[in-house]
Amino acid sequence: MLGRAISRDSGCAVSDVQRLTERGALVRVARGLYAVPDAEISTHRSLVEVARAVPAATVCLLSALRFHELTTQAPADVWIALDVHAWRPRRTPFPVRTVYFSGAALTAGVEVHKIDGVSVRIYSAAKTVADCFKYRNKIGTEVAVECKPACNIDQFRGVTGVQN
């Protein structure tokens, strides 16, 4: 996965990227995002593309559950968390559902995973399950109940304030 900003930082001109695209050496995946045509497509490609389009976003709720393999549901949208003062993203390669967090709710439990060579911010499994209960009216109670047995109580320590 190659973004235009990365190509600029590495010394490539925009015309080089255009030329490579015209020759078939690169394929335009989304606005400003390119890939090698015969590259393996990850099952989490939507997360990669949204992370490139909205760098301040953290993958959360249903999308994070799917990433951690805690649900059987496949969300149609990529769920992202942003700071309460952030603007809603206008252009994304995939449809997104945005929730707004602030303070510790935004920063606690964030893990950075490398997917297709791109760093993607995703909430930990424990934080995701806790957030599913917090947002049960938005995502549905059945989703939160489905993922609860998959988590161990020790995972929640320090994330949700669970004490002995």
Image (spheres, rainbow, N blue to C red):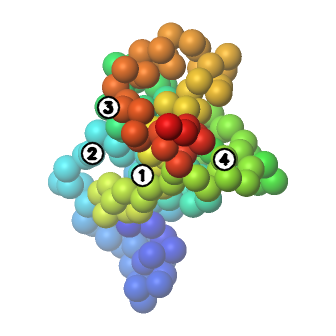
Q: Which residue is drawn at 40% across and 73% down?
A: 17
Q: Is 4 placed above or below 97 here? A: below
Q: Residues within 10 Å of mark 3 (few under 14, many from 20)?
A: few
Q: Earlier in the sequence, mark 4 or mark 1?
A: 1
Quarter-wise, where is residue 73 in the image?
top left
Disc 2 marks which residue? 42
Q: What is the secondary structure assignment of the residue under circle 4? A: helix
- In the rendered image, which quarter contains the N terminus? bottom left
Label placed on residue 97: none
Label 1, label 3: how far apart the Cα atoms are? 17 Å
Q: Which amino acid does label 3 sit on?
A: Glu
Disc 3 marks which residue? 69
Label 4, label 1: how far apart the Cα atoms are? 22 Å
Disc 4 marks which residue? 105
Disc 1 marks which residue? 48
Which residue is the extreme one toward the right? Answer: 85
Out of 120 and 144, give the one closest to the viewer.
144
Q: Earlier in the sequence, mark 1 or mark 2?
A: 2
Residue 128 percent across, percent down from the top left: 50, 36
Q: Can residue 158 be seen in this view?
A: yes
Residue 115 percent across, percent down from the top left: 32, 55
Label 4, label 3: how far apart the Cα atoms are? 22 Å
Q: In this view, does 26 lie to the left or right of 120?
A: left
Residue 124 percent across, percent down from the top left: 45, 45
Q: What is the secondary structure assignment of the residue under circle 3? A: loop
Q: Earlier in the sequence, mark 4 or mark 3?
A: 3
Q: Residues within 10 Å of mark 2 (few under 14, many from 20)?
A: few
Q: Residue at x 72, y 42 (%)?
A: 100
Foreground label between 4 and 3: 4
